[in-house]
Image (cartoon, rainbow, N blue to C red):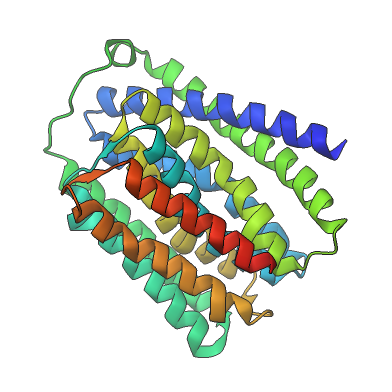
Amino acid sequence: MDFLFIIIGLVLLVFGGDWLLKAAVGMSLRLNISKIVIGMTVVSFATSAPELIVSVKSAMAGFPDIALGNVVGSNIANIGLILGIVMIISEMKIDESFFKTDWPAMIIASLLLFGILLYDGEISRLEGIILFILLILFIIYLLKAQKNKPVEIDLPEANQMKMYLIFIFLILGGAALYGGSELLIKGAVNVAKTFGVSDRVIAVTVVAIGTSIPELAASLIAAIKKESSISIGNVLGSNIFNILSVLGLTAIIHPIKLVDNRLITFDIYWMLGFSLILLPLVLLPKKGYLDRKAGIILLGSYILFVYLTFA
């Protein structure tokens, strides 16, 4: 039964990613908003919903390691697994906003989380409020910065999509992603627990990969349809949302206390490493592009991380 949950969950996630992409592109064209902003806001928020649900449930149920490990592991998987696979399939052109706002914002959010945990090993309600306020300020800045930029209309069918259809696809996509993630996590965690794996290891690997499947589905479909700005924006935006929104809201509802020190002595360093390595990969050997070689480096590094986590 657990394996059936995993299969059904994956199918729902693929369909959900496609519906969400249609809604995102259609909305960007209808509202004349840059696709990178839509990717970093609407798509990122929807694909980060599973992390939010899992983290809140875990923290309230007394499993803070799953709540925190889920976000740290998801951020690692978003770059190492998702971007790695996407880049192997299709070369990715990087938007100028990557250098000006997206990558710096992700690094700042990651370092902020590292500093908070290093200070006292806990994300308090006050710190959760600060994280969430920073997210709101970031979104406001994004919308203002992109307001006057033209949108390239290269998908006629999305441009002609009625607003009510956009919202239908958005709701269907979000619901499919949520339901698919729930089934996938339930099946995967049950399978993992039969091998006696700890909460932290389950969180940074099985649960993290499960909750990152929506990002993978949305990014893969975006890359296949040559919408690389949505693909990279979705991944970077999701990492920012995971820290500022998921951990912020979770801490506001229930403070998150660090239990397993490996999260702060091992896992979070991998998260910072994956975030930092993106910049040299974008600059070399061809500035503004992420190619197949970069994808192999990221995916190989992620496989190494998973191996060392279980070792």
Whether residue 250 is visible to the viewer of this picture, yes or no, is: yes
Residue name at image x 49 percent, y 41 percent: 215
Q: How many marks?
A: 0
Residue 106 picture location, percent across and down: 34, 61
Q: Name the residue rendered at 73%, 29% in the picture.
A: 8
* Residue 239 screen position, x and y as percent: 43, 56
The residue sitting at 39% across, 46% down in the picture is 295
Q: Is residue 65 left or right of residue 114?
A: right
Q: Where does residue 108 sit, x and y in percent of width and height?
A: 32, 69
Q: Is residue 202 left or right of residue 295?
A: right
Q: Where is 235 relative to 271, above or below?
A: above
Quarter of the figure with residue 196: bottom right
Of 262 and 259, nearer the camera is 262
Residue 251 against residue 232 in the figure, above or below = below
Residue 13 in the figure: left or right of residue 6: left
Quadrant showing the C terminus = bottom right
In percent of the image, x 47 and y 29: which residue is there?
A: 20
Front residue (pair 285, 175): 285
Residue 25 image position (x, y, % from top left): 34, 26
Figure quadrant of the N terminus: top right
Hey, which residue is sitting farthest bottom in the picture? Answer: 120
Q: Can residue 74 be seen in this view?
A: no
Q: Is residue 42 above or below residue 145?
A: above
